[in-house]
Image: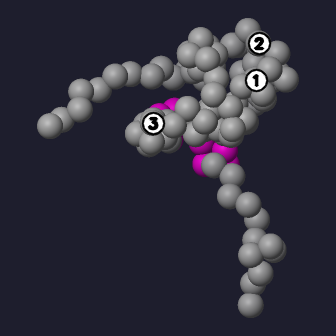
Amino acid sequence: MVSIKSMPEFDAARYLNSETSIAAYLTDILQANDAALLAAALGDIARARGMTEIAKSAGITREALYKALRPDSAPRFDTVNRVCAALGVRLVAQAIQP
């Protein structure tokens, strides 16, 4: 019998290897309407792309990026926008169908 403790922890960053997979992941996360979950998802994507490079592109320190994108954070919109730009994605609005 396999113990849960012996199972590796799931890491979404391992699967975020294309713009399409990143966009699909963010779209799903945004539907949850949870700022902390969005921060964690952006952190997953930034880890997949390289935190140092994303921090440089976003114009913030690597430490500040880690802090802003930890699972329990609520980053400012400016930070989310800068990180999205550094990741090569943008958040878009979509009409809710009745």
- Residue under circle 3? 33
Front-lying residue, 90 or 98? 98
The Cα atoms of the two marked residues, 2 and 1, are separated by 7 Å
**Other residues around mark 3 within 10 Å, as few (<14) / some (14–19) / many (≥20):** few
- Does the residue at mark 2 contact the one at mark 1 (Cβ under 8 Å)? yes
- Residue under circle 2? 60
- Residue under circle 1? 65
Q: Quadrant of the C terminus?
A: top left
| 87 w.r.t. 15: above or below | above
Q: Position of residue 97 (x, y in %)?
A: 18, 35
| 4 w.r.t. 47: above or below | below
Q: Which residues are magenta?
A: 13-23
Q: Secondary structure at mark 1?
A: helix
**Mark closest to the chain's N terminus, 3 or 1:** 3
Q: Is residue 66 left or right of residue 45?
A: right
Q: Tell me what residue is drawn at x 68 percent, y 58 percent.
A: 10
Quarter residue 42 falls in: top right
Q: Position of residue 49 (x, y in %)?
A: 69, 32
